[in-house]
Image: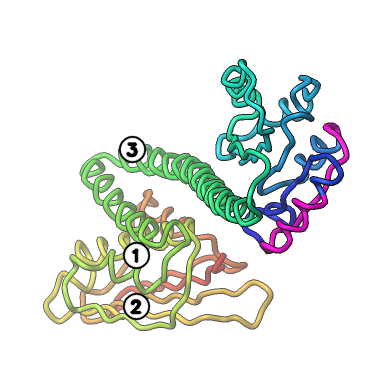
Amino acid sequence: MPVGGPDSERALVLLRPRDAEVASSLLREAAVAVQVCTDLPHLAAELAKGAGLAVIGEELVANDKSEGVKDWISNQPAWSDLPIVMLTGRSDPPNRTQLARQMQDNFGNITFLERPFHPTTLMSLARSVLRSRRRQYEARHLLSRYELLARELQHRTKNILSVILSIASASLREGGDGSAAFVDRMHALAKAQDLLFENEGQGALLEDVVRTVLLGFGNRISIEGPHVQLKAGIAQGFALVVHELATNAAKHGALTQPSGSICVRWSLDASSAEPSIHFIWQERGGPPSSPPEHRGFGTLLLERAVASSDRPPRFDYGQEGLTYELTALCQ
């Protein structure tokens, strides 16, 4: 199918009957689909359905009764400039230049072709203007894509600002090193955003999110799990969760002692209508773990940053170290 739609590359022909018959035959020989129009209102109606070019007899529009066609031409979208081949007579009246300028003002992208002409001239001209028309359709496609990306960027910007405001408000209320915690959480979120932009906003692999966030926390962390593609919001949530767990491990957990280590692993359950991830963070070799003395924003973040299934995250504060488990929806 042509890039502009089923009718996008056809030639609309508005000529006197004999001329229309000849021109249509030549165009079809050049592999161009043809729709013969009986009058100007018919041409205007067919233009609304789509066209690659129009072949018009000068004498049929010189009476200035072509308002419907001129309206369509003037109201074309920014990407469109319909090519028009205007067949003229051999005579050269004194006002020829003025008439040509008037035609261009009314119909825009006009190429004048004087009759009689060699058959190959019309065929070659039709192929040439159709090539330019296809470039217009490609421009339309790019514009549509850019508009879609702009709307998506606007949507994501609003979402990320909401997340930032929420984190800022909660982090700064904590007092103490709340400002430092806020900055660190922003860095984790920024790393997730970098991954999403690399993939043109289509999401990110869970493994990439985990490895990127943990990059500065040493080499005592093992990572294991299948390839799981996360949507943007879920990827951001996992980035915040993993960063919070790693920060806590560096301050109070396994990473505070040389013998400490962390195992991060996950599995995918795709058997249900809504596939889910079972995510485990397990610390060993560090000091005994214990529940926090008060529920701060960090705990709230670990509980709610990622949309979970029916089961809330599980915290196991054992003598051998913290184990955190989360079952989350992939979408």
Could you say whether the residue bearing mark 3 is in a helix, strand or loop? helix
Could you say whether the residue bearing mark 1 is in a helix, strand or loop? helix
Disc 3 or 2, which lies upstream in sequence?
3
Q: CA distance from mark 1 to mark 2?
A: 9 Å
Task: In the rendered structure, find residue 173 and report the number of the disc placed on it.
Answer: 3
Could you say whether the residue bearing mark 2 is in a helix, strand or loop? strand
Quarter of the C terminus within the rendering: bottom right
Quarter of the N terminus within the rendering: bottom right
Type of amino acid at the residue the image marks with label 3: Arg
Q: Which residues are magenta?
A: 21-41
Q: Which of 96/41 is in front? A: 96
Against 254, is 6 above or below? above
Type of amino acid at the residue the image marks with label 2: Val
Q: Which of 257/242 is in front? A: 242
Coloring scheme used: rainbow
Q: Where is mark 1, residue-wise?
A: 242
The residue depicted at 37 percent of the width and 56 percent of the height is: 197
Give x and y (percent) for residue 13. Answer: 77, 45
Tell me the mark number nearer the camera, choosing from 3 and 1. 1
Q: Where is mark 2, residue-wise?
A: 264
The residue depicted at 66 percent of the width and 49 percent of the height is: 52
Give x and y (percent) for residue 285. Answer: 21, 81
